[in-house]
Image (spheres, helix red, strand yellow):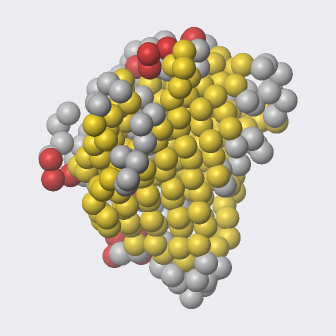
Amino acid sequence: MNYSPDDIVLLDRGSDTSVIVHLHGATIISWRCAGEEMLFLSKNAVFDNLKAIQGGIPIVFPKFGPWKYGPHHGFARVLRWKLEMPPKKDKHGNVFAVFVLEHNELSQAMWNIMFKLVYTIRLEESALHVDLSVHNTDKITFGFNCLLHNYLLTPEVTRSGVIGIQNLNYWDKVKGGEDTERNEEVFIRENIDRVYNDVPNEIVIGNMAGSRTLMVKTFNFPDVVIWNPWKDKAKSVYNLGDNEYRNSSLINIRLFLFGHLLKTGKKKNCAHDADKYGKF
């Protein structure tokens, strides 16, 4: 990949299990688990420290979607974060690192709010834990959206089913309307863009790397977006290869649909664990 060594932080647990974090957006661009890559990163991803990185796990804050004050999906994924605590191991061999983004001239030119984001990553033997806390350091209450895009790598997206969302209501952005999920296992076999509400804190994605399943456990992430542009729309997605849609099952884990109000001096924590286990 065409990025500078000065721009990345490596969490290495040994046994070919590691995480690479790019300081541009504190974007996790690689999670290897026992030699298997778990995250999708586009071959066309740009590492210019200006544009959002296409793939991995970007952080969306303070706005999801179009934003009249700044870039699409907010500024957290296009600003440089500070490495607050370099990687270190605990007594169990797990590796921790902490990254921070605070208000600065660039952020305040778009959003005149004082804040602090603290992003903690813990790499375990077969799991990746991420914790994002939003701190209000301003004198006023502010509202925000927060989302972690999980670009999950799968050998063939049509065989990767999502379990745990049956009977949930969702907004279908492709068809334009509300519906209820009737399937026990949801497969991605066409252009899909759905927002599922009030999702249980555990969902399962099958047929990931090495034909393994991935258990995703969430905290304060009540909504889940399942998205894949499919063949025709993939051509118009920024920095996504025309045929890469078949290898990327995009499960976006999202905090609050319309924003959360955070009072002065308060913080909001949200987290998710991705745990790889046995054959599907």
Q: Is residue 247 left or right of residue 157?
A: left
Q: Position of residue 169 (x, y in %)?
A: 82, 36
Residue at the bottom extreme, as displayed: 139
Q: Quadrant of the N terminus?
A: top left
Q: Position of residue 75 (x, y in %)?
A: 42, 59
Q: Position of residue 174 (x, y in %)?
A: 67, 28
Q: Nearer the viewer, residue 131 or 171?
A: 131
Dividing the picture into quadrants, the one containing residue 98 is bottom left
Q: Is residue 200 left or right of residue 97?
A: right
Q: Nearer the viewer, residue 23 or 173?
A: 23
User: Which residue is pictured at 61% across the width and 67% down the height?
Assistant: 268
Residue at the front extreme, as displayed: 91
Q: Quadrant of the C terminus?
A: top right
User: Which residue is pictured at 75% across the width and 31% down the height?
Assistant: 165
Q: Would you place residue 142 above or below residue 94 in this image? A: below
Q: Is residue 114 visible?
A: yes
Q: Is residue 1 left or right of residue 256?
A: left
User: Which residue is pictured at 15% across the width and 53% down the height?
Assistant: 6
User: Which residue is pictured at 44% across the width and 59% down the height?
Assistant: 119
